[in-house]
Image: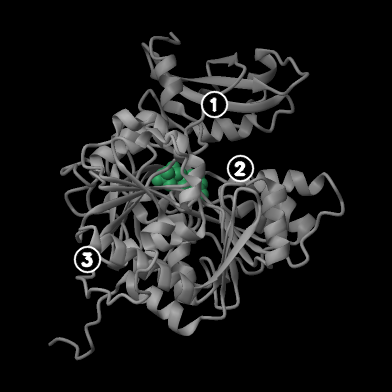
Amino acid sequence: MLGLMQDRPLLISSILDHAARNHGGAKIVSARPDGTLTRHTWPQVAARAAQLAHALTARGVRQGERIATLAWNEHRHLEVYYGVSSMGAVMHTVNPRLFPDQIAYILKDAADTHLFVDPTLLKGAEALADRLPETLRTIVVMGTEAEIPADCPLRGRFEVLAQESLIAGQPEQFDWPELDERSASSLCYTSGTTGEPKGVLYSHRSTVLHGLAVLQKDVFNIGAEDVVMPVVPMFHVNAWGIPYAAGMAGASLVLPGPRLDPASLHRLFEEEGVTFSAGVPTIWTALLQWLRADPARRFARPPKLVVGGTALPAPINAGFLKEYGVHIRHAWGMTETSPLGTANTRKPENAEWDEDRFLDYARKQGRPLFGIELRVRDAEGKPVPQDGVAFGELEVRGPWVAGQYFNRPGDPAFTADGWFRTGDVVTVDALGCIEIVDRAKDVIKSGGEWISSITLENLILGHPAVAQAAVIGIHHSKWDERPLLLVVPKPGTSPTAEDILGYYEGRVAKWWVPDRVEFVDSLPLTATGKLWKADLKHKYKDRSLG
Ligand code: AMP
């Protein structure tokens, strides 16, 4: 027997309609590169998104067609987000920090027809001109005509126009189509740290369900009174769903533009009364250092922060809470999981823990949101015990988890029984909380046992002379692989190998201690600021440790 409830589809257009109809009092603040601010409201965002959809429809853009953006967090990007998806086309955000070859690859793979480019990124697009795909017809500069240089070399090959001229004179209402909620809404590529970037094609349904899920008290905890500032870029997994979640809640949005330095962010926190923000550890680490440099730097009203993307160093969390009263919540996710999969908040079982004990626990990535199921299996495919010690590869499934990649059927990341293999190696504890110990491809396979490279890296960062560290597996004739430690020493120190390796004594099992340490000037980072182990491994691929 079927239920007798109305079968209304879950659509991105309904988020926009809802915000415009019911939350006209919220503000949408957008920072320009020079620090000046523009102000809009949800009804204005809706009107401009409708104008954009009319303009694209008039130019023949069809449902399912991919429309790319190379842009920061600002209001025109938000309008493209809502306008493109609501009309049934696919919003394809591209990370401008990727290497040019990767950007060219991604645009070609997606077969985009339009590319929206922030004026500050136009030079980058020009450098790519010869490699832009044949499907691309139009380049829209996200500003006014005055922001397009007269000699823009893209002009010869493409139609180049400004977003303001594109939408000018178009009607401010659009009769949004009633799409199948499983229709594609947006496309985002993985950062490609392990090879070619892979496209994850979100649907209206997955986006709406993810948006509802992140609003929860134990996840982002956002309501209509919140002023939400996504520092995480809108080109990185839809800014963790914040543009949609804010619309659902009717919250205000502060879009910080390209300037993410601590002083610019702090000014927005204070002047705009930001109550919630989300970003990667590098952002919060830099902000903490900047705050500490001057005792006058405080928060009038400490915001709630969420961190994810890479593990949060415990001293950062402790520093924010103890010195500034700012709570940071740790969350985990991936491009393939929309991205939120887990978040770490208190439960009845640990409600009584004192602050220090919970701060230590907050290094873990958290427990699953409702809708996300986890399973952790060891190298032989057996489930690992929930003891917080044994580890295995994390697999997930749920309504906002990818079922396959765009243009790549049959990828082995998807199991025959419907799970996605994350490539993250984790422990799970009795409270259902996961802790990432490594990426599957980075664990060091020594004599059939696994050594966590991340554990070795985090430990050695406690050594007073170590600024940065990386551990990679190097070929070994007897053990298959053994760990090699690479260390960037702190300025003014010159530690010895014995001194560094001796630090592991008593802290890890003897067979975990790296066979060798080498001192280097720097370590390679990916476009998303993560340690680029693939590059390191490539560099050391012909080495052997015995
Ligand atoms: P991306 O798809 O670029 O967002 O990268 C996803 C990967 O980032 C995950 O598979 C993890 O390896 C890593 N990651 C995400 N969140 C965290 C976190 N809170 N702690 C540690 N690693 C994380």
* Disc 1 target residue: 470
* Amino acid tagged 3: Arg
Query: Which dot marks residue 302?
Result: none
Residue visible at 43% across and 15% down in the picture: 539
Mark 3 C-beta to ligand 1 under 8 Å: no
| Picture quadrant where residue 273 is located | bottom right
Q: CA distance from mark 1 to mark 3?
A: 42 Å
Q: In this rendering, would 297 be left or right of 408?
A: right
Viewer-proximal residue among 251 and 190: 251
Residue picked out by circle 3: 182
Q: Is residue 390 visible?
A: no
In the rendering, at what x and y percent does residue 361 appear?
Answer: 60, 54
Residue placed at 46% from the left, 53% from the top?
234
At mark 1, the secondary structure is: strand
Q: Residue type at mark 2?
A: Thr
For residue 337, side relative to residue 503 (left or right): left
Q: Local crowd at mark 2 within 10 Å, few (<14), some, or many (≥20)?
A: some
Q: Residue furthest bottom?
A: 4
Q: Is residue 16 left or right of residue 507?
A: left
Q: Which residue is mark 2?
A: 282
